[in-house]
Amino acid sequence: MESCVLETEEIIPELNHIELERCRRQMMLPDFTLEHQKRLKASTALIAGIGGLGGTAAVYLAAAGIGKMIFAHYGNLTISNMNRQILMKHDWIGKSRVMQGKKTIEEINPDVEVEIYDERTSEDNIDKLLSGVQIAISARPNFHERRILNNACVRQGIPMIEAAMNGMEGYLFNVIPGVTPCLNCLYPEDNPEWEELGFPVLGAVSGMLGCLMSIEAIKILTGYKEPMLNRLLYFDTGRMEFKEFKIYKREDCDICRPLPFSKPQILSGLYVHSC
């Protein structure tokens, strides 16, 4: 079967002198080259939810020099959002979150393009949201929207970073279609006790997860270092305890079972599967 290969010579852009200076310190990392930075600039990420997790991930993806982000988040800013949503400012309470998020990112890095949708993630708009995207950040506060994103990413072969928190705890794993388990493999059923706005949030915990999501996204997009594959990171910051668990693809998963299970390969800096 033919491989999904990104033609880097056609899309990898050059960096202007401001971008080169902005990313100079991260290019001091061992083996992080100009090619890695160009790959990041050539990339587009969907941030499905720009709250405590997704908003923090967006800040550090912008600071690192990603080329484009698509924000999808419905609703206006409330005062209760302000303990964790670092993209937001107090004087924007009552206004659209995605509009403020776009403004903040442009202030951090004006070279990043931001496209916004004041919408929930749904079956009706998911293909539009994922159009031209190389990676998705799953950061909505409900399983319904997360499942829609997971299913579409698996179907379209788009890597997804999955993370969630509750109180002082958090988890993180990567969904690489054809390589790793998907969200449905780990959580085939919703927890009926879990409500969208019914769980406690310490802002620093969600921010910590957002930082980790951005790191994994950068690794997958650029091919720099090794992202987590078939592993789940769990932590409890109340005890400052970190654990890692091996995760497995379910043979009876209705979402990713049809995909052939293959070893990961890096082609042009992106994890891909045969199509």
Image (tube, helix red, strand yellow):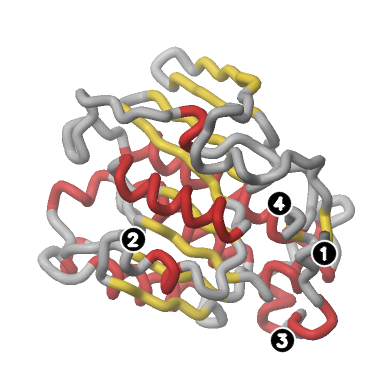
**SS class, disc 4:** helix
Work out how far the residue at label 3 is from the one at label 2, CA to CA, in angstroms.
39 Å
**SS class, disc 1:** loop
Q: Is residue 23 visible?
A: yes
The amino acid marked with disc number 3 is Asn
Which residue is disc 2 drawn over? Answer: 123
Q: Earlier in the sequence, mark 1 or mark 4?
A: 1
Q: Is residue 254 left or right of residue 175?
A: left
Q: Quadrant of residue 78?
A: bottom left
Picture coordinates of residue 12, whole percent (x, y): 76, 80
Label 3–label 2 contact, CB within 8 A: no
Which residue is disc 4 drawn over? Answer: 219
Q: Earlier in the sequence, mark 1 or mark 2?
A: 1
Work out whether 241 lies above or below 200: above
- Residue depicted at x 85% and y 64%: 33
Is 202 or 178 nearer to us in this picture? 178
Picture coordinates of residue 90, whole percent (x, y): 19, 61
Location of the N terminus by quadrant is bottom right
Work out how far the residue at label 1 is from the one at label 2, CA to CA, in angstroms.
28 Å
